[in-house]
Image: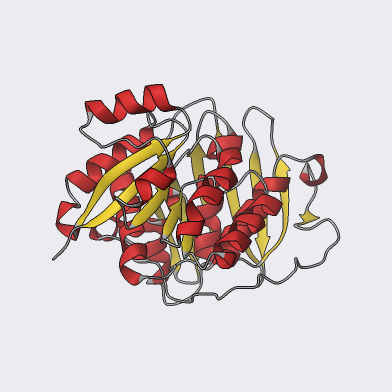
Amino acid sequence: MAVKRIGFVDYRLDNYHAEVYLKALRGPLASRGYEVAGATSLERTISRAWAEERSLPYFNSIAELNDAVDFYVVLAPSNPELHLELCQETFPFGKMTFVDKTFAPDELTARAIFALADACETPVQTTSALRSTAVQVFARELPSPVQSLTIFSSGTSFDEYGIHPVELAVSCLGRDVVSLMRFGPERHPQWLLQFSGERTAVIDFNPEIEIPFSAIVSTQQGYDRIEVEGATLFLDAATSILDFFDAGRPLIDRRESLTVRRILDVAMSDRVRGALAPLRADGAEPAPIPSPHWDREPVVSRHAVESTGRRQQ
């Protein structure tokens, strides 16, 4: 069987995501039949040195990289403002493309990226690493819907790391977010998200200390506290990328990705501080997304399944 070739497209390759995904594909996931066959970046000098140290072929442009790969992974995890530019160079080749977190700097740009993908007939998927965890496994196996979710998270700034708890909330409770509110001090904010059906999520984001991601999941049957396994977090995330490539189509409904971005757009605004406010200021739903939607649940690796906690009665 021919090896399936992945190309990394980045701003600067010397970042954590490029490192852990490369190690996962060369190590535990090597049996999946994929390899990182090359990389390119906007910043060339440091990136070329990084690639050479890891025996990874480096190309001066996406056009040069294209002949060497079958799939693209657009990284630049700390620079979402560059994703549209990178996608404009990548999507015209029509190859399946995963775009790393955070997908775009705002909802308008996110919609532009999806529209570009449709125009180029390029299957695209985006997600944070917190999409493929034991929390989602637990939620899908419950006999009744999740009623409430309390998420504990951290990161150096909400601007960069807020996507993780928001993605976790939306992936477990759906895209029907009605309203949200921010409360608590600026140095340690919390959010209340109200979903349809009187369901809620509370996000506790602490930038002052490093704490493991965890969630308390409550249902009609009881509750459980589940801690995300940090040791396999990016291995599970890389697994989900390969599942997307194997399927030949996105496995995550892009409407959820846009809901995540919409929440992030307003989460730090004065409009939601201290009072519940509609997710959209005008109370209207956004224009329809002119593209197919996919209902299949994303695949979660066995690592996440094995770390699922027990439900308390």
What residue do we see at 34% from left, 71% from top? 247
Q: Position of residue 276 (x, y in %)?
A: 78, 53
Compared with 114, 150 (above or below) is above
Compared with 202, 268 (above or below) is above
Say whether residue 306 is left or right of residue 174.
Answer: left
Quarter of the view holding residue 2: bottom left
* Quadrant of image for the N terminus: bottom left
Say whether residue 25 is left or right of residue 150.
Answer: left
Say whether residue 166 is left or right of residue 112.
Answer: left
How many discs appear?
Answer: 0
Quarter of the view holding residue 271: top right
Q: Residue furthest right?
A: 282
Q: Position of residue 257 (x, y in %)?
A: 57, 59
Could one spot residue 21 in this view of the protein?
no
Quarter of the view holding residue 243: bottom left
Q: Position of residue 272 (x, y in %)?
A: 78, 46
Q: How is the image coloured?
A: secondary structure
Q: Position of residue 312 (x, y in %)?
A: 38, 61
What residue do we see at 18% from left, 58% from top? 3
Nearer to us in this view, 66 or 297: 66
What residue do we see at 78% from left, 58% from top? 280
* Quadrant of image for the C terminus: bottom left
Compared with 71, 27 (above or below) is above
What residue do we see at 66% from left, 50% from top? 109
